[in-house]
Amino acid sequence: MVIAMIYKERMKELRTMELITQKDMASFINIGRSAYSQYEAEYIVIPLEHLINFCNYFNVSLDYIFGFTNILQYDLEIKDVNSIEAGKRLKEWRKNNKLTQELIANIVNTNRSVIANYERGRNLISLPFLHAICSKYKISADYLLGRIDEALEIKIKDKKKKF
């Protein structure tokens, strides 16, 4: 299952509303301006760690950036993401929903061992995989990563509409 991620509109909107240049944003994330430009245009997928830094800078949730909600920020949102805690949350959510690692792997077009490594906290889940799981199961990305404690159900918006 391949789901288009459309985060570029909100990234650009937030950055330009605050009159921040791509160069300044790239500097904050600690990358080159060219790389940032490609992330913002979705020519290449922004690594989750960089997107979290972007969200923290603007005080917005991942769910907002993904277009899953119009709520800018959740109450009691945790800014840092720990791969071990995120892995525990992913595993807990998967088991509570009676889903296998194999099924999740098929959804995100990978193998079971990749999902197992996410759940063990060896790697932080990749952005496309996180987006695909959240879109399919209508679960908050911020919840799965441990940024909020409430398992919010998201509403997938029509991606053709302007935010």
Image (tube, grey):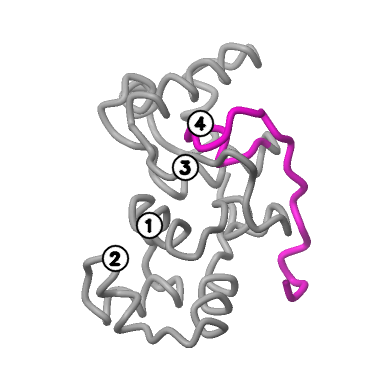
* Residue 20 higher or lower than 155, as above or below: below
* Residue 57 higher or lower than 48, as above or below: below
Q: Which amino acid, by three-letter code, is at mark 2?
A: Ile
Q: Marks 1/4: CA distance?
A: 29 Å
First in residue order: circle 2 vs circle 1: 2
List the residue tagged with mark 1: 53
Helix, strand or loop status at disc 4: helix
Q: Residues within 10 Å of mark 2 (few under 14, many from 20)?
A: some
Residue 106's disc number: 4
Q: Residues within 10 Å of mark 1 (few under 14, many from 20)?
A: some
Instruction: Look at the image and give the residue range highlighted in magenta.
Output: 139-163
Q: Marks 3/4: CA distance?
A: 11 Å
Q: Which amino acid, by three-letter code, is at mark 3?
A: Phe
Residue 129's disc number: 3
Which quarter of the figure has residue 136? top right
First in residue order: circle 2 vs circle 4: 2
Q: Nearer the viewer, mark 3 or mark 2?
A: 2
**Main secondary-structure element of the magenta-colored stretch:** loop
* Picture quarter with the C terminus: bottom right
Residues 161 and 1: in front is: 161
Residue 146 included in the magenta stretch of the image: yes
Residue 11, position as x, y percentages in the image? 52, 71
Residue 150's disc number: none
List the residue tagged with mark 2: 29
- Would residue 98 appear left or right of 78 to someone viewing this image? right
* Residue 89 higher or lower than 75, as above or below: above
Helix, strand or loop status at disc 1: helix
Q: Marks 2/1: CA distance?
A: 6 Å
